[in-house]
Amino acid sequence: MSKSYKSDATKGEIRHIVCIRCDRETNHKVLQSVQFDWSTENGDIQGQDLYEIVQCMGCDELSFRIGSTNSEDINYDERGAYMHRETVTLYPSRIMDRTPLEDDYILPDIIRSIYKETHTALSAGLKILAGIGIRALIEAICKVESANGGNLEQRINDLLAKNILTPKSASILHDTRFLGNQSAHEIIAASDTELEIAFDIVENLLEQVYIIPRKAERLKKRKQPFNNSSAV
């Protein structure tokens, strides 16, 4: 295989990618880059990998971008002309409209740990691991809340009996439980839409059970009148 490297060949160029802080697609400027060109010994297949440090032009957040193309991976434009398709990988991994919960530090340690790992798997497109993580989050909530039962279905019902869940939330969690079963036991990946909806449901549950009550306690304390015990 023949190969060659070129430094800063794309420096100053603009990339339109999702910003991990802005949570939407923004223009990113290439600060530094290394271009790696390669081909097989007989020259039948050629490729190029671009390694770029990019900076969001809105919030200045830094990311690492890899853009890869090769002569075997071809797409066609609107005029029917062929073009080489670029595969883009971003670090840290991210997907639009999926920033972590702002107050996840309020969550119990075991739940926060699983939540972060599941969020990372979802952002990286690891569908089976994300589905297993969603189920593990439900299991962790049941454990922290000391839910009784020989299986997850019974433990969710116990959370309902303890008024930790509303009937509607319990019904939704049962549906989410089946998605986790599919990933964990049948090794079948859920669709992007199913995972997005399931994760939204679990995030809302975490907010209802842990985050909002803690915030309400803080607000209540702030509203308590000042008691000056030294007053005469």
Image (tube, grey):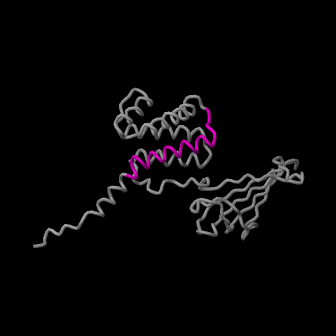
User: What is the tally of numbered marks visible in this picture?
Assistant: 0
Furthest residue in direction top, as rendered: 150
* Residue, far bottom: 232
The reply to whether the magenta stretch includes residue 192 is yes
Q: What residue do we see at 79% from left, 57% from top?
A: 37
18 lies left or right of 154: right
The one of 3 and 103 positioned closer to us in this rendering: 103
- The x, y position of residue 59, in whole percent, is 58, 68
Horizontal side of residue 192 vs 225, given as left or right:
right
In the rendering, at what x and y percent does residue 108 appear? 38, 47
Q: Is residue 36 above or below residue 155?
A: below
Depth order, front residue of 200/83? 200
Residue 216 pos. (x, y %): 35, 56
Magenta span: 188-212
Q: Residue at x 73, y 59 (%)?
A: 50
Q: Is residue 106 magenta?
A: no
Main SS type for the magenta part?
helix
Picture coordinates of residue 146, whole percent (x, y): 34, 36
Q: Is residue 169 left or right of residue 23?
A: left
Q: Quadrant of residue 179?
A: top right
Q: Is residue 138 visible?
A: no
